[in-house]
Image (spheres, grey):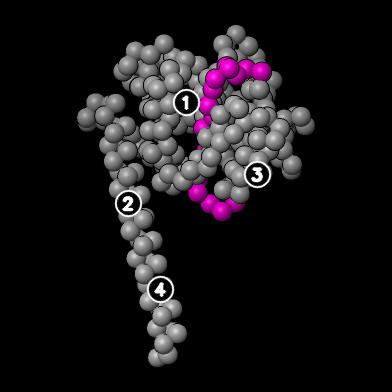
Amino acid sequence: MSFNFKKKLQIYIQDRIKEIAVNQQKSEQVVLDYAQISRLFPEPDFIPYTDWSISPSVILHILNDIVINKRQNIIEFGSGVSTLYIAQLIKTLKLPTRLYSVESNEEWLSNMHKEISRYGLNDIVTFVHATMVAVPKELGLHEQELWYDSEKLTSALQNVKKFDLVIVDGPFGSSTPYARYTAIPFLQNRLAKDYAVFWMMVIEKRNVKFLKIGLTYYRSNLNLWGDILILGVTSLLILYPL
């Protein structure tokens, strides 16, 4: 066995050991974050996660932002476990905060209504059912074809105060290219002076690419700045106004 091959093998093994250690540390952090957010609910309760659920670490980031920045009007695109945790946080801490949750899948929305009712959170969450339709040209990006029905959203949100936290976890990224881009342009005149955007996708090469393209576009066209974080199985773009 040549010296060069031995050296390369040694470097490869060292790199793999480091990678395993980093991944283990990340997994341990996700477990700790899950334990932290689970304290919001009674001990026997269990909140199920699916392959599409956002990471507990991202949920903890969002909950911290709500408390630290005293968010009062939140909108999320894509209902799910985050809806339950945010609403339960608002109830537990008795915050003067409202949550508006937009969902395109009627069957899933029906399930979410049941879960919200089960925990007595109906007075905190307002669900908006908006199907996927052709995206208006002025709200789309590149070859994007679909987004939530913006006319339905406009009607449902017409009497709502400006939002200070936006959570973009829908629609499904595979429904159309740049599916999650439109949330910010749509809300541009419905945002408070100080706000934050949490835009997330499951970790995949193409999804991280979409986040980077979105970040570049937001910076140059909407005067926003932000960073991309990898938390558990979720790639997260956090945006703030300049």
CA distance for labels 4 and 1:
53 Å
Task: Tell which of 166 and 52 is nearer to you.
Answer: 166
Identity of the residue furthest to the top in this view = 159
- In the rendered image, which quarter is residue 67 located in? top left
Q: Secondary structure at mark 3?
A: helix
User: Residue 75: in sight, yes or no?
Assistant: no
Q: Which residue is mark 4?
A: 11
Number of the front mark, 2 or 1: 2
Residue 169 location (% of width, % of height): 52, 35
The residue located at (36%, 62%) in the rendering is 18
| Contact (Cβ within 8 Å) of mark 4 with mark 3 | no
Q: Identify whether 64 is placed above or below 93.
A: below
Residue 11 location (% of width, % of height): 40, 73
- Classify residue 142 as left or right of residue 239: right
Query: What's the amino acid at mark 4?
Result: Ile
| Contact (Cβ within 8 Å) of mark 2 with mark 4 | no
Q: Which residue is mark 3?
A: 213
- In the rendered image, which quarter is residue 129 located in? top right
The disc, 2 or 4, on the residue closer to the chain's N-terminal end is 4
Identity of the residue furthest to the bottom in this view = 1
Query: What's the amino acid at mark 3?
Result: Ile
CA distance for labels 2 and 1:
37 Å
Q: Which residue is mark 1?
A: 110
The disc, 4 or 3, on the residue closer to the chain's N-terminal end is 4
Let me know if residue 192 is in the magenta part: yes
Q: Which residue is mark 2?
A: 25
Crowding at dot 3, Cα within 10 Å, few <14 / some 14-19 / many 20+, comes out as some
Task: Tell which of 44 and 108 is nearer to you.
Answer: 44
Number of the front mark, 4 or 1: 4
Let me know if residue 221 is in the magenta part: no
